Image (cartoon, grey):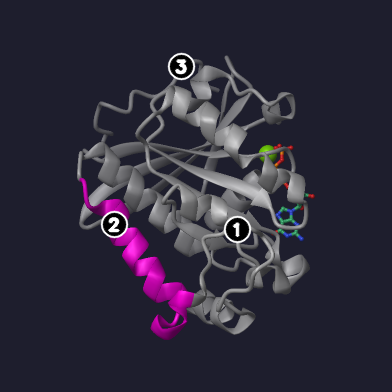
Amino acid sequence: MANVEPDYEKAGEDGETKVKIICLGDSAVGKSKLVERFLMDGYQPQQLSTYALTLFSYNTEVKDIKVKVDFWDTAGQERFSKMHPSYYHNAHACILVFDSTRKVTYKNLPNWFKELREYRPEIPCLCAANKIDVDYSVTKKQFSFAKKHGMPFYYVSASDGTNVVKMFKDAIHAAVGYKNNSTDFMDEIMKELENFELDPENKSNISDSGLDSTENSQGKEEIQASKSAS
Ligand SMILES: Nc1nc2c(ncn2[C@@H]2O[C@H](COP(=O)(O)OP(=O)(O)OP(=O)(O)O)[C@@H](O)[C@H]2O)c(=O)[nH]1
Ligand SMILES: [Mg+2]
């Protein structure tokens, strides 16, 4: 049980870079399950007693740099549509999550994004449509919010694992890039995703209309393929 927030400016015991990643979104969209899915058994949850928060630590490497990632998770504070400021404090990247089976959770993304930007104006932000396992046809829909804000976008499932590793790896890269004042990491991620998700000849099918009903070129097969690639 820890009472104080880790100092993310200080290097870790092994000289590792420390980053903090947060997930935001409505209650029950699957934020906790996504983190659990990514970490599987390899994490040590740690309760921060001061706030109703849990910290999941994960050690990895990014471009030969040792990195300790803290994924922060809430105990459902988001039900009140406001997070404790300590949740945002010092965060290096954010994943905005909505539930692809509940439209209202998508509609609420701008509110979460606004609150995030009040506390962390610059940190990289990624966007995830979770629970695609319930109905894979949702991956044919356009969710323009991410595109509008230049965010990487992922169709994911915490249940079957689709794209979960890919998304968290990108989030870790973005967090480390942000911390190191690197400027090109988001472009790198976006570029990679373009190739990852779409055939070049189908790119023109992507509409910027802001509607959620147009079809894009990303079908189940590509999703499955990307899963095995990650
Ligand atoms: N089918 C399906 N169910 C999911 C998926 N991810 C999460 N769930 C279910 O959705 C419910 C909410 O998941 P949580 O991870 O607790 O959601 P949360 O966003 O952390 O919710 P709070 O912490 O209460 O705000 C649980 O019953 C999960 O089993 C998914 O990818 N597919
Ligand atoms: Mg949760």
Q: Which residues are magenta?
A: 183-204
58 relative to 130 in the view: left or right: left
Alpha carbons under labels 3 and 2: distance apart: 35 Å
Q: Quadrant of the N terminus?
A: top right
Residue type at mark 1: give it. Phe
Q: Are dots 3 and 2 in contact, CB under 8 Å?
A: no
**Which of 133 and 68 lies nearest the eye of the viewer?**
133
**For the residue carrying disc 1, how many other residues have a C-alpha within 10 Å: few (<14), some (14-19), or many (20+)?**
many
The residue sitting at 55% across, 44% down in the picture is 96
Question: Which residue in the protein does label 2 denote?
Answer: 187
Alpha carbons under labels 3 and 1: distance apart: 38 Å
Percent coordinates x, y for residue 136 in the rendering: 71, 73
Residue type at mark 3: give it. Val
Is residue 73 shown to the viewer in this render? Answer: no
Q: Is residue 31 above or below residue 216?
A: above
Dominant SS of magenta comes to helix
Residue 188 lies in magenta, yes or no? Answer: yes
Per the image, label 1 sits on a secondary structure element best described as loop
Percent coordinates x, y for residue 131 in the rendering: 70, 60
Q: Quadrant of residue 211?
A: bottom right
Ranked by sequence position, the earlier of labels 1 and 2 is 1
**For the residue carrying disc 3, how many other residues have a C-alpha within 10 Å: few (<14), some (14-19), or many (20+)?**
few
Query: On residue 17, which mark appears?
Result: none
The residue sitting at 38% across, 50% down in the picture is 172
Ranked by sequence position, the earlier of labels 3 and 1 is 3
Q: Classify mark 1 as within 8 Å of ligand 1 or not, answering yes or no.
A: no
Which mark lies nearer to you, 3 or 1? 1
113 relative to 92 in the view: left or right: right
Ranked by sequence position, the earlier of labels 3 and 2 is 3
The residue sitting at 77% across, 57% down in the picture is 101
Query: On residue 143, which mark appears?
Result: 1
